[in-house]
């Protein structure tokens, strides 16, 4: 498998890599996963502060997509004011070694 499984046939979005990008691609999703990996659980407003300049609307939509893809768990506490916490699912935790490799790559190449 891997990059060799494509070999120029069909739609690249239908490959395993295409699926991965559909789940974690975009400007914010990897940052959200990284933030949760470093300090879970995280409340919405705390996440918003740490991800400036993300908007409330964008953060909300990205979290909903990550939740729908089985990457983020949302836990709501029935209290006033309402409290909602987000954490990684076991599926998302399988991605952590890849995130670590991306961090290492960034460390090695940031100043080159």
Image (cartoon, rainbow, N blue to C red):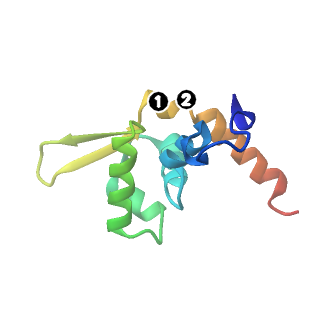
To which quarter of the image does residue 10 belong? top right
Which residue shows up at 14% across the image and 55% down it? 81
> In this rendering, is residue 31 above or below 102?
below
Residue 46's label in the rendered image is none
In the rendered image, residue 8, in percent from the top left (x then y), is placed at 71, 44
In the rendered image, residue 43, in percent from the top left (x then y), is placed at 34, 50
Which residue shows up at 48% across the image and 52% down it? 32
- In the rendered image, the quadrant that contains the C terminus is bottom right
Q: How crowded is mark 2: few (under 14 residues within 10 Å), some or many (20 or more)?
A: few
Q: Would residue 88 appear left or right of 81 to someone viewing this image?
A: right
Residue bearing mark 2: 94
Q: Would residue 106 appear left or right of 24 to someone viewing this image?
A: right
Residue bearing mark 1: 91
Disc 2 to disc 1: CB gap under 8 Å:
yes
User: Which element is circle 1 on?
Assistant: helix
User: Which element is circle 2 on?
Assistant: loop
> In this rendering, is residue 112 above or below 85?
below
> In this rendering, is residue 79 above or below 112?
above
In the rendered image, residue 88, in percent from the top left (x then y), is placed at 43, 37
- In the rendered image, the quadrant that contains the N terminus is top right
């Amino acid at each position: 498998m891997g990059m060799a499984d494509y070999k120029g046939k069909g739609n690249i979005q239908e490959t395993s890599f295409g699926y991965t990008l559909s789940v974690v691609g975009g400007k914010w999703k990897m940052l959200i996963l990284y933030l949760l990996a470093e300090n879970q659980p995280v409340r919405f407003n705390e996440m918003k502060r740490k991800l400036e300049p993300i908007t409330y609307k964008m953060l909300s939509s990205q979290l909903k997509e990550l939740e729908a893809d089985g990457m983020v768990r949302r836990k709501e506490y029935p209290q006033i004011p309402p409290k909602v916490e987000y954490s990684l699912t076991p599926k998302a935790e399988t991605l952590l070694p890849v995130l670590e490799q991306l961090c290492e790559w960034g460390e090695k190449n940031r100043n080159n």
